[in-house]
Structures are given as structure tokens and as C-alpha cells.
Amino acid sequence: MKIALIGANGQLGSDLVKALRPVHDLIPLTHADVEITERASLESMLQLHQPDLVMSMAAFHKVDACEEQIGLAFAVNTYGVRNLALACRVHGAVLLHISSDYVFGGDRTRATPYVETDSPAPINVYGISKLAGEYFIRYCLDRYYILRATGLYGVAGSSGKGGNFVELMLRLAKEGKPIRVVDDQRMTPTYTMDLARQIAALIETERYGLYHATNQGSCTWYEFAAEIFRQSGLAPNLSKAKTGDLGEKATRPAYSVLENKALQNIGLDQMRPWQNALAAFLQERQQVREQKEN
Ligand SMILES: NC(=O)c1ccc[n+]([C@@H]2O[C@H](COP(=O)([O-])OP(=O)(O)OC[C@H]3O[C@@H](n4cnc5c(N)ncnc54)[C@H](OP(=O)(O)O)[C@@H]3O)[C@@H](O)[C@H]2O)c1
């Protein structure tokens, strides 16, 4: 397959390059190569490369910043995604897009993972803009894959957020500062290499539609931090915080655990438990650091 990958140097994008390059004719594109908020930019990219499949990692996903920069959130996450869908329709390309667990509102009493057929009800600007982007794809295209992910981390670090939660925790531990992490938001941390491999398997099927795709199990952000330190052999001064204690601007769901039901239904859910994925990530991270030192 000829695949145009938008956001190829981002966190998930760089792992997709590793997973797809050996098998497909991959065209990795950076933000400098294509701007999804501009129809003309997408049009010329599609005209030039004529891909069978367009994968887009592009998003404005700083959740707190979205509360204040609503115009930008909608320009990228909604209208930009509409541009992608329309361009794919004109050129007959399939679109693969990454959405978010934040399309759900997850009240405090919920304890059952969300499946794809559950009604979304976002409670922050980021979630609303991502959900509207999903709806535009479903409205414009028949052949699409939308994958909802949660709490991504990978060796590249998120370019949009300047790192990821694991890197932040390890840095704070190194600095020896007290660390406070919320213990009332439950989700599933997900390793981008696992998601990239899952995507590589899914695109072989032509089973288009909406998918939840996260590692298995769930934890609070505090529990995630504790496991990062346990697996890294660190014992920093870690304590629990409550939502709102840390001055966040956006409301976040208390529960946004997703079940990979649609992947299970087609016998394709290959995501492992989040603790095992974290161990694999820490190992990969160590190898990358050793390679840089040599
Ligand atoms: N990070 C998470 O925890 C998380 C959780 C759930 C879902 N997601 C979704 O997963 C996807 C990938 O996340 P990620 O962490 O891999 O993000 P990332 O590292 O920030 O990568 C995003 C990539 O898209 C590019 N990009 C941003 N805006 C663009 C635009 N307007 N036009 C073209 N390219 C643009 C970025 O380039 P520049 O950096 O050069 O701008 C970057 O290469 C996003 O859709 C995000 O909403 C992320």
C-alpha cells in the first residue's frame, strides 16, 4: 500500500514509521510538508503522492490550552480533520485518524469501560473538537479507520506536549522534587509502539470503522506514576492529588477507560496489559539512550 503519514515525526508517528516502513510504500510527512488546516496544502500533497491511505497524527492536543485557544482547537481537530476527509474523498483514499478517550465524560460513579457503541459526551473543548472531527469523517467518508487512544507515551515523546507523562515523572524524580499526581482520574496508559503495531495489523483487513485501541487494564495517573517508579527502581516523594488541586484549566473525565471491543469482535485485539507495555517501553528507552551514548 502507498501510505501518506502526516505527523510522521511525532510520538505515535515515529513508531508508525518503524512499524510500516518494512511492509509498505511509506511517505513520511512532517508539519513542514503539509498543513491540515489548509485545503490547498492537502490537495497538493494528495495530487503529488496519490496515496491509497492517508494516516493523520495531526492534532492540537494540549488539553488545558484548548480551553483558551478554542479557535485553534477547532481549526485543527475539527475543520482540519474535515479537510482531510474531503481531500481523501476527492482522491479516493482511505483515511486513518486518531481520536481520544476524552470524547467521553466519565462521571465519578462509572466503573465499566466504554465500548464504541456508547454515546460520547465530552466535557472539555479538546474532547468536543475531537468528537466533531470524528463526526466529519463519518459524514464525508465510507472508508475510514478512527482509533480512539488514551494516555500515549513513546520514545519520541509527544512533539505537541514536549514529552510525555513517563518522561516527566522520571525527570521530576531525578530532580528530587516532591511529586503530586491525581488519583481520581482512571484511564489506560498506552505505549505508542503497541498502538503502531495494532494499526499495522488493522489496515491489512479493510474492516473500516470506529475502534477503541488502548493497552489492557486501567489505573489512575497516580497508580501509573507509582508503577513507573517501581519498574525503574526509584523511590521519590510521591503523593496523591485530587482533580483541581494542580490548577488545571480543563475538566477531565474521572473515568475514561476504553474497551477494545470492535477489535475483539474481528479477532484482532493484540494490545497487552499496560504494565507489560510500560516495561517494554522502559527497555526500549534504555536501549535508545545507550545507542546515543555510544
Ligand atoms: N498524546 C496523548 O496522550 C494522546 C491521547 C489520546 C489521543 N491522542 C491523539 O493521538 C494523535 C497523536 O498524538 P501524539 O502524542 O503522537 O502527538 P504529537 O507527538 O504531538 O504528534 C503530532 C504530529 O502532528 C503534527 N501536526 C500538528 N498539527 C498539525 C497540522 N495542523 N498540520 C499538519 N501536521 C500537524 C505535529 O507536528 P509539529 O509538532 O511540528 O507541529 C506532529 O508531527 C493525536 O491525534 C492526538 O489527539 C493523543
Image: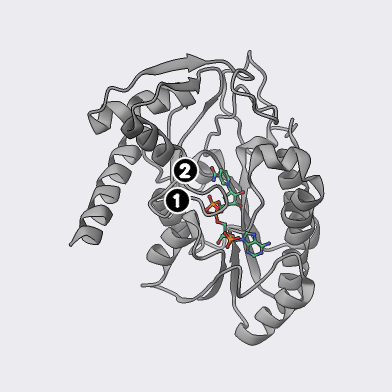
- Queried on whether the Cβ of the residue with tag 2 lies below 8 angstroms from ligand 1, the answer reads yes
**Res 117 visible:** no
Question: Where is residue 176 shown, x and y percent of the image?
Answer: 33, 27
Residue at x 27% of width, y 22% of height: 235
- Residue on which the image places disc 1: 157
Above or below, 101 relative to 3: above
66 to the left or right of 276: right
Left or right: residue 164 versus residue 48 is left
Locate residue 125, reporting x and y percent: 76, 39
State the image coordinates of residue 98 (x, y, percent, origin top left): 60, 52
Which image quarter is the C terminus in? bottom left
Residue type highlighted by circle 2: Asn
Q: Which mark is residue 164?
A: 2
Rate crowding at label 2 as few (under 14), some (14 to 19) or many (20 or more) other CA atoms within 10 Å.
Answer: some
- Residue 276, disc: none
Q: Of the two numbered discs 1 and 2 on the same chain, state the one appearing first in sequence.
A: 1
Work out whether residue 168 or residue 42 is closer to the camera in this orientation and state it.
168
Q: In the picture shown, does residue 143 fall above or below 209?
A: below
**Which is more toward the observer, 88 or 279?**
279
- Tell which of 36 and 250 is nearer to you: 250
80 to 187, vertically: above or below = below
